[in-house]
Image: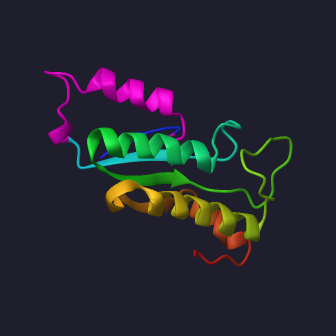
Amino acid sequence: MIHLDNGWDNSMVQSWYKGTLTPGKLALSDIDIMGFSMYPFYGTGATFANLTNSLTNLVKAYGKDVIVVETDFPFACSGVTLSENISPGAAGQSAWVAGIRDVLKSLPGGHGKGIAYWEPSELTKTPFKLV
């Protein structure tokens, strides 16, 4: 797996793969899965719409499976603008994961394969159920 940050950033992700998948560096056949981070507090561009666009473009270009291998959503958050209009807390955590799940389900050819919730200790602060 190749894991890049900011999977929602289509320009960055496309540029990275175009620059790296070149003879003598890395072949597409060397990659089993494309992994990405998706956090709501790393920039207001980290939206479900942008993630959908970026990952759809990658799947169409390279035909590889995709996993969001790093994500989480705050139980409490102050002084930060979140990228989606979702309130911090247990309900917000569920909504965030459901939004990413929906993005992955929408990818062409069933190439959206899963989510890894990063920093699971946040889940112990409140009842939380992945959906």
Residue 108 position by quadrant: bottom left
| Colouring method of the image | rainbow
Between 69 and 97, which is closer to the camera in this rendering?
97
In the rendered image, the vertical position of residue 36 relative to residue 117, given as above or below:
above
Split into 4 quadrants, where in the image is the C terminus? Answer: bottom right
Please tell me which residue is depicted at 62% across the width and 78% down the height of the picture: 129
- Examine the structure image and report whether residue 14 is included in the region drawn in magenta: yes
Q: Position of residue 39 (x, y in %)?
A: 61, 47
Q: In this image, 47 relative to 17: left or right?
A: right
Q: Position of residue 81 (x, y in %)?
A: 80, 41
In the rendered image, the vertical position of residue 100 relative to residue 13, given as above or below:
below
- Examine the structure image and report whether residue 27 is included in the region drawn in magenta: yes
Please tell me which residue is depicted at 78% across the width and 53% down the height of the picture: 85
Between 118 and 1, which is closer to the camera in this rendering?
1
Q: Position of residue 30 (x, y in %)?
A: 17, 40
Please tell me which residue is depicted at 28% across the width and 24% down the height of the picture: 20
Q: In this image, 66 relative to 41: left or right?
A: left
Looking at the rendered structure, the number of numbered marks drawn on it comes to 0
Q: Position of residue 71 (x, y in %)?
A: 56, 53
Please tell me which residue is depicted at 44% across the width and 45% down the height of the picture: 55
In the rendered image, the vertical position of residue 81 relative to residue 111, given as above or below:
above
Residue range in magenta is 7-30
Q: In this image, 123 relative to 102: left or right?
A: right
